[in-house]
Image (cartoon, rainbow, N blue to C red):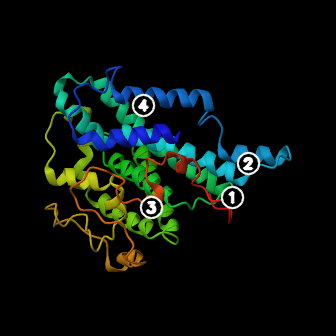
Amino acid sequence: MASIFGRCTRYVHQNRKADEIPPWDTKSEFAGINSSLLLLESYSKLGTQRISEVVLQSHHTNTDVDRQQIGHLIFAHTLYHLCHCLLNHPFLMRLRLKPFGQKAPASFATRALQTGCDHAKQLMDLIRDATESGCRIESSFYAYCIAVAGGIHSLASHLEHQNTARRQSDILHYFNESVEYLERLAKLWVHASNMALRLREFHTMSHRFASLLDPKCLAEDLDPSCEEVCWSMIDYAILGADPRKKPLVSKTGFSNLPSPSQSQWALGTLGPDTPQFDGNGTDIFSGLTPNMRLNDVEYLLNCSPGTNDIV
Protein backbone atom coordinates (compact mmCIF):
# COMPACT_ATOMS: atom_id res chain seq x y z
CA MET A 1 0.00 0.00 0.00
CA ALA A 2 2.82 2.39 0.86
CA SER A 3 4.42 1.77 -2.52
CA ILE A 4 1.19 2.64 -4.35
CA PHE A 5 0.75 5.69 -2.13
CA GLY A 6 4.23 6.90 -3.00
CA ARG A 7 3.45 6.47 -6.69
CA CYS A 8 0.17 8.35 -6.24
CA THR A 9 1.79 11.31 -4.49
CA ARG A 10 4.52 11.56 -7.13
CA TYR A 11 1.76 11.71 -9.72
CA VAL A 12 0.04 14.48 -7.77
CA HIS A 13 3.33 16.40 -7.40
CA GLN A 14 3.71 16.45 -11.17
CA ASN A 15 0.10 17.46 -11.70
CA ARG A 16 0.98 21.06 -12.61
CA LYS A 17 2.80 19.77 -15.67
CA ALA A 18 0.72 18.92 -18.73
CA ASP A 19 0.40 15.20 -19.34
CA GLU A 20 0.46 14.15 -22.97
CA ILE A 21 -1.43 10.94 -22.24
CA PRO A 22 -5.03 11.56 -21.15
CA PRO A 23 -5.96 9.94 -17.83
CA TRP A 24 -8.70 7.84 -19.44
CA ASP A 25 -6.07 6.16 -21.66
CA THR A 26 -5.13 2.70 -20.39
CA LYS A 27 -1.45 3.61 -20.81
CA SER A 28 -1.66 6.63 -18.52
CA GLU A 29 -0.21 6.82 -15.04
CA PHE A 30 -3.67 7.54 -13.70
CA ALA A 31 -4.95 4.26 -15.13
CA GLY A 32 -1.88 2.42 -13.88
CA ILE A 33 -2.32 3.60 -10.30
CA ASN A 34 -6.02 2.77 -10.37
CA SER A 35 -5.17 -0.69 -11.65
CA SER A 36 -2.72 -1.19 -8.79
CA LEU A 37 -5.36 -0.10 -6.28
CA LEU A 38 -7.86 -2.54 -7.76
CA LEU A 39 -5.32 -5.38 -7.60
CA LEU A 40 -4.55 -4.53 -4.00
CA GLU A 41 -8.25 -4.45 -3.21
CA SER A 42 -8.80 -7.87 -4.78
CA TYR A 43 -5.84 -9.52 -3.04
CA SER A 44 -6.13 -7.92 0.39
CA LYS A 45 -9.94 -7.61 0.52
CA LEU A 46 -9.59 -3.96 1.49
CA GLY A 47 -12.92 -2.58 2.55
CA THR A 48 -14.74 -5.92 2.65
CA GLN A 49 -14.63 -6.16 6.45
CA ARG A 50 -15.13 -3.37 8.92
CA ILE A 51 -12.53 -2.77 11.61
CA SER A 52 -15.19 -3.26 14.26
CA GLU A 53 -15.85 -6.74 12.85
CA VAL A 54 -12.13 -7.59 13.02
CA VAL A 55 -11.96 -6.53 16.67
CA LEU A 56 -15.23 -8.30 17.55
CA GLN A 57 -14.15 -11.47 15.79
CA SER A 58 -10.89 -11.52 17.74
CA HIS A 59 -12.86 -11.31 21.00
CA HIS A 60 -15.26 -14.10 20.06
CA THR A 61 -12.48 -16.43 18.93
CA ASN A 62 -10.24 -15.53 21.87
CA THR A 63 -7.60 -14.55 19.35
CA ASP A 64 -4.89 -12.30 20.66
CA VAL A 65 -4.94 -9.70 17.91
CA ASP A 66 -1.86 -7.53 18.10
CA ARG A 67 -2.95 -3.92 18.48
CA GLN A 68 -0.09 -2.79 16.30
CA GLN A 69 -1.27 -5.12 13.54
CA ILE A 70 -4.72 -3.59 13.73
CA GLY A 71 -3.05 -0.20 13.60
CA HIS A 72 -1.26 -1.12 10.38
CA LEU A 73 -4.53 -2.42 8.93
CA ILE A 74 -6.37 0.81 9.71
CA PHE A 75 -3.55 2.92 8.35
CA ALA A 76 -3.32 0.88 5.14
CA HIS A 77 -7.08 1.25 4.62
CA THR A 78 -6.79 4.99 5.23
CA LEU A 79 -3.99 5.33 2.67
CA TYR A 80 -6.09 3.33 0.21
CA HIS A 81 -8.96 5.81 0.48
CA LEU A 82 -6.58 8.79 0.48
CA CYS A 83 -5.07 7.58 -2.81
CA HIS A 84 -8.52 7.58 -4.39
CA CYS A 85 -9.27 11.01 -2.90
CA LEU A 86 -6.10 12.48 -4.42
CA LEU A 87 -6.42 10.74 -7.77
CA ASN A 88 -10.04 11.87 -8.13
CA HIS A 89 -9.89 15.16 -6.25
CA PRO A 90 -12.19 17.67 -8.02
CA PHE A 91 -9.47 20.32 -8.29
CA LEU A 92 -6.71 17.95 -9.43
CA MET A 93 -9.06 16.28 -11.89
CA ARG A 94 -9.90 19.72 -13.32
CA LEU A 95 -6.21 20.43 -13.91
CA ARG A 96 -5.68 17.00 -15.41
CA LEU A 97 -8.55 17.19 -17.89
CA LYS A 98 -8.44 20.86 -18.86
CA PRO A 99 -5.65 20.46 -21.49
CA PHE A 100 -7.86 18.01 -23.37
CA GLY A 101 -10.92 20.28 -23.36
CA GLN A 102 -13.99 18.80 -25.00
CA LYS A 103 -12.08 15.62 -25.84
CA ALA A 104 -12.46 14.49 -22.23
CA PRO A 105 -15.35 11.99 -22.01
CA ALA A 106 -18.09 13.37 -19.78
CA SER A 107 -18.69 9.93 -18.33
CA PHE A 108 -15.04 9.67 -17.24
CA ALA A 109 -15.16 12.99 -15.41
CA THR A 110 -18.49 12.17 -13.76
CA ARG A 111 -17.29 8.77 -12.61
CA ALA A 112 -13.98 10.12 -11.32
CA LEU A 113 -15.60 12.93 -9.35
CA GLN A 114 -18.12 10.53 -7.81
CA THR A 115 -15.29 8.15 -6.88
CA GLY A 116 -13.46 10.92 -5.07
CA CYS A 117 -16.55 11.87 -3.09
CA ASP A 118 -17.32 8.23 -2.26
CA HIS A 119 -13.85 7.52 -0.91
CA ALA A 120 -13.84 10.74 1.10
CA LYS A 121 -16.94 9.39 2.84
CA GLN A 122 -15.46 5.91 3.22
CA LEU A 123 -12.32 7.36 4.77
CA MET A 124 -14.38 9.07 7.46
CA ASP A 125 -16.52 5.94 7.93
CA LEU A 126 -13.30 4.02 8.56
CA ILE A 127 -11.99 6.55 11.08
CA ARG A 128 -15.32 6.57 12.90
CA ASP A 129 -15.59 2.78 12.94
CA ALA A 130 -12.05 2.39 14.26
CA THR A 131 -12.58 5.01 16.96
CA GLU A 132 -15.87 3.50 18.10
CA SER A 133 -14.15 0.09 18.27
CA GLY A 134 -11.69 1.40 20.83
CA CYS A 135 -8.79 2.14 18.50
CA ARG A 136 -7.05 5.41 19.22
CA ILE A 137 -6.47 7.20 15.93
CA GLU A 138 -3.69 9.52 17.03
CA SER A 139 -0.82 9.28 14.54
CA SER A 140 -0.03 12.69 13.08
CA PHE A 141 -0.58 11.81 9.42
CA TYR A 142 -4.26 11.03 10.00
CA ALA A 143 -4.84 14.78 10.25
CA TYR A 144 -3.82 15.27 6.63
CA CYS A 145 -5.99 12.38 5.44
CA ILE A 146 -9.01 13.78 7.26
CA ALA A 147 -8.37 17.32 6.02
CA VAL A 148 -8.23 16.21 2.37
CA ALA A 149 -11.48 14.28 2.79
CA GLY A 150 -13.04 17.28 4.53
CA GLY A 151 -12.11 19.57 1.66
CA ILE A 152 -13.88 17.25 -0.78
CA HIS A 153 -16.96 17.14 1.48
CA SER A 154 -16.98 20.94 1.56
CA LEU A 155 -16.87 21.21 -2.23
CA ALA A 156 -19.56 18.57 -2.65
CA SER A 157 -21.88 20.27 -0.16
CA HIS A 158 -22.11 23.35 -2.38
CA LEU A 159 -22.85 21.59 -5.64
CA GLU A 160 -26.02 23.23 -6.96
CA HIS A 161 -27.60 20.18 -8.51
CA GLN A 162 -27.54 17.90 -5.47
CA ASN A 163 -30.09 15.15 -5.93
CA THR A 164 -31.92 15.81 -2.69
CA ALA A 165 -31.73 18.07 0.31
CA ARG A 166 -31.17 14.98 2.45
CA ARG A 167 -28.06 14.06 0.47
CA GLN A 168 -26.67 17.56 0.94
CA SER A 169 -27.35 17.26 4.67
CA ASP A 170 -25.44 13.98 4.75
CA ILE A 171 -22.45 15.60 3.04
CA LEU A 172 -22.48 18.46 5.55
CA HIS A 173 -22.53 15.86 8.31
CA TYR A 174 -19.35 14.32 6.90
CA PHE A 175 -17.74 17.75 6.64
CA ASN A 176 -18.57 18.60 10.25
CA GLU A 177 -17.32 15.21 11.35
CA SER A 178 -14.01 15.87 9.59
CA VAL A 179 -13.59 19.12 11.50
CA GLU A 180 -14.50 17.42 14.78
CA TYR A 181 -11.86 14.70 14.32
CA LEU A 182 -9.24 17.30 13.45
CA GLU A 183 -10.10 19.17 16.63
CA ARG A 184 -9.60 15.96 18.61
CA LEU A 185 -6.19 15.48 17.03
CA ALA A 186 -5.44 19.14 17.76
CA LYS A 187 -4.97 18.16 21.39
CA LEU A 188 -1.90 16.21 20.28
CA TRP A 189 -0.62 17.87 17.12
CA VAL A 190 -0.16 21.54 16.25
CA HIS A 191 -0.73 20.98 12.55
CA ALA A 192 -4.08 19.27 13.20
CA SER A 193 -5.29 22.42 14.93
CA ASN A 194 -4.15 24.52 12.00
CA MET A 195 -5.79 22.15 9.52
CA ALA A 196 -9.11 22.39 11.36
CA LEU A 197 -8.99 26.18 11.14
CA ARG A 198 -8.08 26.15 7.46
CA LEU A 199 -10.81 23.66 6.66
CA ARG A 200 -13.41 25.84 8.36
CA GLU A 201 -12.12 28.91 6.53
CA PHE A 202 -12.09 27.07 3.20
CA HIS A 203 -15.70 26.07 3.75
CA THR A 204 -16.73 29.74 3.91
CA MET A 205 -15.54 30.20 0.34
CA SER A 206 -15.83 26.73 -1.20
CA HIS A 207 -19.17 27.61 -2.78
CA ARG A 208 -17.09 29.56 -5.31
CA PHE A 209 -15.50 26.31 -6.45
CA ALA A 210 -18.62 24.16 -6.79
CA SER A 211 -18.11 24.11 -10.56
CA LEU A 212 -15.08 21.86 -9.97
CA LEU A 213 -17.58 19.06 -9.50
CA ASP A 214 -19.41 19.88 -12.72
CA PRO A 215 -18.03 17.86 -15.68
CA LYS A 216 -19.45 20.45 -18.09
CA CYS A 217 -17.11 23.14 -16.72
CA LEU A 218 -13.81 21.31 -17.20
CA ALA A 219 -12.72 23.46 -20.15
CA GLU A 220 -13.24 26.73 -18.27
CA ASP A 221 -10.24 28.64 -16.95
CA LEU A 222 -9.70 28.69 -13.21
CA ASP A 223 -8.75 32.00 -11.70
CA PRO A 224 -5.15 31.95 -10.33
CA SER A 225 -6.36 33.07 -6.92
CA CYS A 226 -8.89 30.23 -6.85
CA GLU A 227 -6.19 27.80 -7.92
CA GLU A 228 -3.98 28.97 -5.07
CA VAL A 229 -6.73 28.39 -2.53
CA CYS A 230 -7.46 24.91 -3.89
CA TRP A 231 -3.79 23.94 -3.83
CA SER A 232 -3.61 25.09 -0.23
CA MET A 233 -6.15 22.40 0.72
CA ILE A 234 -3.94 19.67 -0.76
CA ASP A 235 -0.43 20.84 0.11
CA TYR A 236 0.62 19.42 3.48
CA ALA A 237 2.86 22.38 4.29
CA ILE A 238 0.15 25.00 3.81
CA LEU A 239 -2.53 22.93 5.51
CA GLY A 240 -0.34 22.47 8.56
CA ALA A 241 1.05 26.01 8.68
CA ASP A 242 0.02 28.51 11.33
CA PRO A 243 -2.98 30.38 9.81
CA ARG A 244 -1.83 33.60 11.49
CA LYS A 245 1.50 33.47 9.66
CA LYS A 246 0.28 31.85 6.44
CA PRO A 247 -3.34 32.99 5.99
CA LEU A 248 -5.41 31.20 3.41
CA VAL A 249 -6.91 34.29 1.80
CA SER A 250 -4.35 37.07 2.18
CA LYS A 251 -2.95 36.68 -1.35
CA THR A 252 -6.09 35.58 -3.11
CA GLY A 253 -8.19 38.69 -3.45
CA PHE A 254 -10.99 37.16 -1.35
CA SER A 255 -10.79 39.96 1.19
CA ASN A 256 -14.57 40.13 1.49
CA LEU A 257 -14.85 36.58 2.77
CA PRO A 258 -15.38 35.92 6.48
CA SER A 259 -12.44 34.60 8.48
CA PRO A 260 -12.41 32.56 11.69
CA SER A 261 -13.11 34.51 14.84
CA GLN A 262 -10.39 35.48 17.29
CA SER A 263 -11.53 32.73 19.64
CA GLN A 264 -11.08 30.19 16.86
CA TRP A 265 -7.52 31.37 16.25
CA ALA A 266 -6.71 30.28 19.79
CA LEU A 267 -6.71 26.68 18.59
CA GLY A 268 -3.58 27.41 16.59
CA THR A 269 -1.39 28.73 19.41
CA LEU A 270 0.38 25.51 20.30
CA GLY A 271 3.86 26.55 19.19
CA PRO A 272 6.18 27.67 16.39
CA ASP A 273 7.03 24.24 14.99
CA THR A 274 4.46 24.34 12.21
CA PRO A 275 5.71 23.41 8.71
CA GLN A 276 6.47 26.43 6.53
CA PHE A 277 5.65 26.86 2.86
CA ASP A 278 7.43 29.10 0.38
CA GLY A 279 4.71 28.93 -2.27
CA ASN A 280 7.07 27.96 -5.07
CA GLY A 281 7.37 24.19 -4.93
CA THR A 282 4.97 21.52 -6.08
CA ASP A 283 5.80 18.92 -3.43
CA ILE A 284 2.54 18.67 -1.52
CA PHE A 285 4.33 16.91 1.34
CA SER A 286 7.24 19.31 1.72
CA GLY A 287 6.07 20.09 5.24
CA LEU A 288 6.53 16.56 6.54
CA THR A 289 9.30 15.88 8.99
CA PRO A 290 12.26 13.79 7.71
CA ASN A 291 10.87 10.68 9.39
CA MET A 292 7.69 11.02 7.35
CA ARG A 293 9.16 11.59 3.88
CA LEU A 294 7.17 9.69 1.29
CA ASN A 295 10.19 8.08 -0.34
CA ASP A 296 10.71 6.19 2.90
CA VAL A 297 7.80 3.88 2.16
CA GLU A 298 8.79 1.34 4.78
CA TYR A 299 8.14 3.94 7.45
CA LEU A 300 4.57 4.40 6.27
CA LEU A 301 3.90 0.71 6.85
CA ASN A 302 5.31 0.95 10.35
CA CYS A 303 3.97 4.31 11.40
CA SER A 304 1.87 2.97 14.24
CA PRO A 305 3.70 3.12 17.56
CA GLY A 306 3.68 -0.07 19.52
CA THR A 307 3.17 1.69 22.83
CA ASN A 308 0.36 3.54 24.56
CA ASP A 309 -2.21 1.77 22.36
CA ILE A 310 -1.86 4.53 19.79
CA VAL A 311 -2.82 3.62 16.25
Q: Earlier in the sequence, mark 3 or mark 4?
A: 4
- Residue corresponding to mark 2: 55
Task: Give, as a three-letter code, the residue at label 3.
Answer: Val
Q: Is residue 250 left or right of residue 28?
A: left
Q: Nearer the viewer, mark 3 or mark 1?
A: 1
Q: Could you tell me which secondary element the residue under label 1 belongs to?
A: loop
- Residue corresponding to mark 3: 179
Badges 3 and 1: C-beta atoms under 8 Å apart?
A: no
Relative to 99, say whether 91 is above or below.
below
Relative to 40, say whether 90 is above or below.
below
Outermost right residue: 62
x, y percent for residue 139: 55, 60
Badges 1 and 2: C-beta atoms under 8 Å apart?
A: yes
x, y percent for residue 228: 21, 54
Numbered circle sitting on residue 134? 1
Badges 4 and 1: C-beta atoms under 8 Å apart?
A: no
Q: Earlier in the sequence, mark 4 or mark 1?
A: 4
Dividing the picture into quadrants, the one containing residue 99 is top left
Residue drawn at x 58%, y 27% as measured from the top left:
42
Residue drawn at x 66%, y 46% as measured from the top left:
51
Q: Could you tell me which secondary element the residue under label 3 belongs to?
A: helix
Task: Give, as a three-letter code, the residue at label 1.
Answer: Gly
Residue drawn at x 25%, y 64% as measured from the top left:
248
Dividing the picture into quadrants, the one containing residue 206 is bottom left
